[in-house]
């Protein structure tokens, strides 16, 4: 019945849009006696922003953790471009092009913008000299800085002028931009954003939402988790609603009113 | 108002030059004061001894900076230095092992002891404070055992003694200084050109020039002063080379980035795939190695290894104090090995000057305490810039 629901609500113009890029099917995750995820299916296309909404404890974060490899699920399968893939660890996920931006952003405030963008993945000289351990090869500061500038330019982030500014001196919105820039670097195709606007003021929220829209142009598949329906309606193409560990439906933003979504979130219909 | 000030100081401290300035001002103030009160303080002879006295503290301070950057601490550095010095002394004096080999064994022992403590910290998740405190106690005992009943071993080996008694001829000292200045200038110039070519923002031209002039004056003056007495000591060259290497390691390699990342945000470092365990073990091993270097320099300088010179004295606190006075944060993530040397000079100058002025040990301790308190307070006030809000 759930699956029918999904099919019924499918975007009528889906023939013109991209094919399904990523899907998760039959995901089950139990914590003790509680079904955190009960046979959940979820799909994404490239170039679309998928909103993921639901009350606290509905299973949004658990689903994101399963997709990003942070938490193993009990059963279920993941497919990228129709091929089944295994996601057993965050490393698996990122090597398949899945990146997650956590609510706490995980940036190092004592390092500058460039260092954060390339942390753990620096550009180095002598990278073909295998005798020298990787950690000891000299960093190519200039290339990294140049690429950082380019990455932020693509994302239309204009407020960060020096790539050598320490993250500690940036605003919440700017930090969010850096975290997103880091996620879409390194050939990722799927970006999961966990409450990116939760702690931000009005203008910074706008800034981040613009950024999310621009990810559609770079042909990423984006998942946006948020409690703020205004934000969801502003940037999302489709909305997946979760309730009590189940996916209760996927809706096109254009054909849906916020009231309907609220009703589904709270009452399941 | 206070908040605003804090932010400004914090911002200043984040820049390369800004982190140098407070400790440098402190150093200049101390020199000017003692220069007026005790003119002999500024004599070339006294400067020579000042540099030599600060060498052991400086070596340990440079080492401990590595773990301070990761937000850890090593309380065992002075005792590890003592154990390694004792090993070198026993091997060369009592057993007749050739001195260079004895030194290598000592250095290896230092790295090993540090690595063992690092392993316990990394895998058993015991706070470094506790593990190295246990090390401090345990290694004191170990040092006593190695030194035997007399509690002291004389070191007469010419190689080991030579490490601190040899000075370079004036001409070679000047040539080395010139090479250092040219390399520094070329680095700045090449970096400016490359950044311009790639259209990246450069620091203001006059700042680069100030930096260069400042560095050249410093190096040249120091060389000339040392030449006026005996010449540049080999010890200083060794210390500067090692510090140069560690400075490069911490700022220009992935390893250094990882050190700062672990100190700045452990969880984020873990998520980007940095092995925290590997970082801890290797950093503590490096600190152990530096402690051994300090131990050998100490053995060479005092011509003997005794319990009190290392484990029993104020060496540990002076070394950590030097690192913190140099602007390395006890909270992790901020600091530089170069500043540790400046910090060691501050502590050394203070002790030396107060000695010349005929101050009591009690006064010296209280002065050192006050300087350390000021340094740590400054660190706490400026911690993490705007993020403190």
Image (cartoon, grey):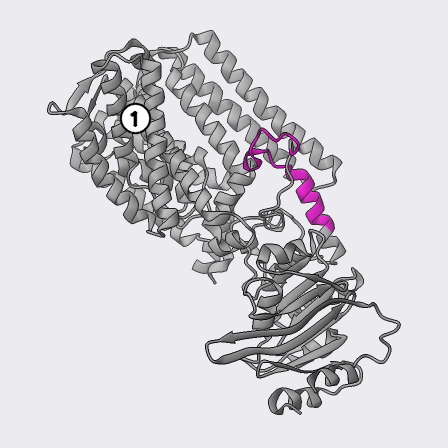
Percent across and percent down for residue B349 are: 31, 29
- Up-down: is B282 above or below A197? above
**Total number of numbered labels?**
1
View extreme (left): residue: B149
Nearer to the camera, A205 or B209? A205
Residue B165 seen in the current view: yes
Percent across and percent down for residue B109 are: 32, 29
Residue B54 seen in the current view: no
Percent across and percent down for residue A180 are: 66, 60
> Which residue is found at the position 76% from the left and 80% from the top?
A253
As helix, strand or loop, the secondary structure at mark 1 comes to: helix
Nearer to the camera, A171 or A22? A22
Decide if residue B255 is on the left or right side of residue A97: left
Residue receiving disc 1: B295
- Up-down: is A225 above or below B105? below
Decide if residue B19 is on the left or right side of residue A161: left
Percent across and percent down for residue B198 are: 74, 38
* Magenta-tinted stretch: A127-150
């Amino acid at each position: 019945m759930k699956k029918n629901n999904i099919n019924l609500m499918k975007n009528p113009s889906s023939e013109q849009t991209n094919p399904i890029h990523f899907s998760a099917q039959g995901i089950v995750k139990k914590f003790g006696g509680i079904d955190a995820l009960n046979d959940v299916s979820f799909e994404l296309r490239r170039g679309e922003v998928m909103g993921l909404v639901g009350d606290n404890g509905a299973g949004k974060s658990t689903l994101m953790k399963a997709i990003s490899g942070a938490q193993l699920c009990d059963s279920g399968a993941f497919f990228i471009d129709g091929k089944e893939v295994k996601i057993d660890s965050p490393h698996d996920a990122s090597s398949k092009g899945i990146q997650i931006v956590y609510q706490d952003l995980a940036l190092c405030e004592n390092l500058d913008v460039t260092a954060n963008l390339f942390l753990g993945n620096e550009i180095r000289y002598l990278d073909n000299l295998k005798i020298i351990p990787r950690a000891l090869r000299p960093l190519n500061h200039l290339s990294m800085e140049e690429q950082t500038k380019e990455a932020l330019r693509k994302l239309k982030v204009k407020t960060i002028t020096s790539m050598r500014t320490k993250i500690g001196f940036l605003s919440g919105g700017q930090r969010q931009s850096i975290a997103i820039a880091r996620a879409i670097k390194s050939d990722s195709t799927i970006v999961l954003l966990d409450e990116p606007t939760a702690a931000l003021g009005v203008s910074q929220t706008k800034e981040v939402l613009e950024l999310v829209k621009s990810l559609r142009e770079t042909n990423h598949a984006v998942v946006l988790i948020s409690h703020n329906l205004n934000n969801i309606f502003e940037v999302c193409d489709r909305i997946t609603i979760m309730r009590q560990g189940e996916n209760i439906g996927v809706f096109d933003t254009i054909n849906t009113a916020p009231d309907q979504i609220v009703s589904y979130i709270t009452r399941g219909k | 108002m206070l908040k605003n000030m804090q932010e400004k100081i914090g911002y200043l401290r984040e820049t390369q030059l800004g982190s140098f300035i407070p400790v440098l001002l402190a150093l200049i103030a101390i020199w000017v004061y003692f220069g007026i009160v005790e003119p002999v303080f500024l004599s070339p002879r006294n400067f020579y001894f000042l540099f030599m006295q600060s060498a052991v503290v400086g070596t340990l301070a440079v080492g401990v900076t590595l773990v301070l950057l990761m937000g850890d601490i090593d309380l065992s550095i002075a005792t590890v230095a003592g154990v390694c010095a004792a090993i070198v002394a026993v091997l060369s004096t009592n057993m007749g092992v050739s001195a260079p080999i004895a030194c290598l064994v000592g250095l290896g022992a230092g790295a090993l002891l540090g690595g063992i403590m690092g392993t316990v910290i990394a895998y058993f998740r015991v706070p470094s404070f506790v593990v190295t405190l246990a090390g401090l106690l345990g290694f004191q005992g170990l040092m006593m055992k190695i030194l035997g009943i007399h509690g002291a071993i004389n070191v007469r080996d010419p190689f080991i003694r030579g490490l601190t008694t040899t000075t370079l001829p004036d001409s070679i000292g000047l040539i080395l200084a010139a090479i250092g200045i040219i390399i520094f200038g070329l680095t700045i110039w090449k970096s400016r050109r490359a950044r311009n070519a790639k259209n990246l923002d450069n620091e203001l031209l006059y700042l680069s020039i100030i930096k260069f002039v400042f560095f050249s004056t410093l190096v040249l003056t120091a060389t000339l002063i040392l030449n006026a007495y005996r010449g540049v000591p080999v010890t200083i060259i060794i210390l500067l080379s090692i510090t140069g290497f560690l400075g490069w390691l911490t700022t220009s390699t992935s390893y250094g980035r990882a050190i700062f990342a672990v100190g700045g945000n452990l969880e984020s470092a873990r998520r980007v795939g940095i092995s925290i365990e590997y970082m801890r073990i290797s950093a503590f091993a490096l600190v152990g190695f530096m402690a051994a270097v300090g131990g050998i320099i100490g053995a060479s300088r005092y011509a003997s290894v005794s319990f009190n010179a290392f484990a029993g004295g104020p060496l540990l606190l002076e070394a950590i104090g030097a690192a913190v006075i140099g602007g390395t944060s006890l909270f992790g993530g901020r600091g530089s090995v170069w500043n540790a040397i400046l910090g060691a000079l501050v502590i050394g100058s203070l002790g030396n000057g107060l000695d010349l002025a005929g101050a009591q040990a009690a006064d010296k301790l209280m002065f050192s305490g006050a300087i350390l308190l000021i340094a740590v307070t400054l660190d706490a006030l400026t911690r993490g810039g705007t993020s403190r809000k």
